[in-house]
Image (spheres, helix red, strand yellow):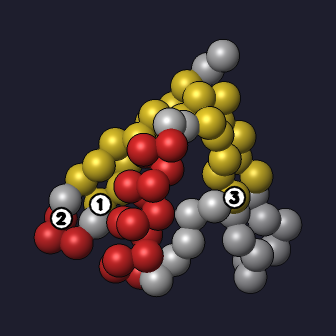
Amino acid sequence: MPAASLVVVGAGRRTVRFRLDGPHLVLADDAEGEDELSGWSTDADADELAVLAAGEFGASAG
């Protein structure tokens, strides 16, 4: 199964790298749409990514 790295830069320029196994990228059909990246990660990585996304941008990772 292929793997990819997702690098997130958070508050204070803190950089965290997450491993995604079996990544899948879906690009939106139009400019207003949202691209989606999915893949398998550990529960700990998913929890940390959710905290980083919500902390600075109010975004969500699901």
Task: Report the quarter where the C terminus lies.
Answer: bottom right
Q: Which mark is residue 36?
A: 3
User: Who comes first in sequence, dot 1 or dot 3?
Assistant: 1
Residue 28 in which image quadrant:
bottom right
- Circle 3: residue type: Glu
SS class, disc 3: strand
Task: Judge left or right: residue 21 versus residue 25.
Answer: left
Query: Percent position (x, y) of residue 8?
Result: 36, 56
Q: Which residue is mark 1?
A: 9
Per the image, label 2 sits on a secondary structure element best described as helix
User: Which amino acid lies under the numbered mark 2 shown in the image of this protein?
Assistant: Arg
| Quadrant position of the N terminus in the picture | top right
Q: Is residue 52 above or below residue 7?
A: below
- Image marks 2 and 3: residues in contact by CB distance under 8 Å: no
Quickly name the residue at label 2. 13
Q: Residue furthest left?
A: 12
Q: Mark 1 and mark 2 in contact (Cβ < 8 Å)?
A: yes
Question: Which residue does the image show at 66% across and 29% down from the upper left?
Answer: 22
- Between the residue at mark 2 and the residue at mark 1, the CA separation in whole angstroms equals 6 Å
* Identity, as a three-letter code, of the amino acid under mark 1: Val
Q: Answer with mark 2 or mark 3, whichever residue precedes in sequence.
A: 2
Q: Residue at x 38, y 55 (%)?
A: 48
Q: Residue at x 71, y 71 (%)?
A: 34
Residue 6, image x, y percentages: 45, 44
- Left or right position of 53 against 34: left
* Gap between marks 2 and 3 measured at Cα: 24 Å
User: Would you call the spot at circle 3 few (<14 residues within 10 Å), some (14-19), or many (20 or more)?
Assistant: few
Give neighbour class at mark 2: few <14, some 14-19, many 20+ (Cα, 10 Å): few
Name the mark on residue 40.
Answer: none
The one of 45 and 30 positioned closer to us in this rendering = 45
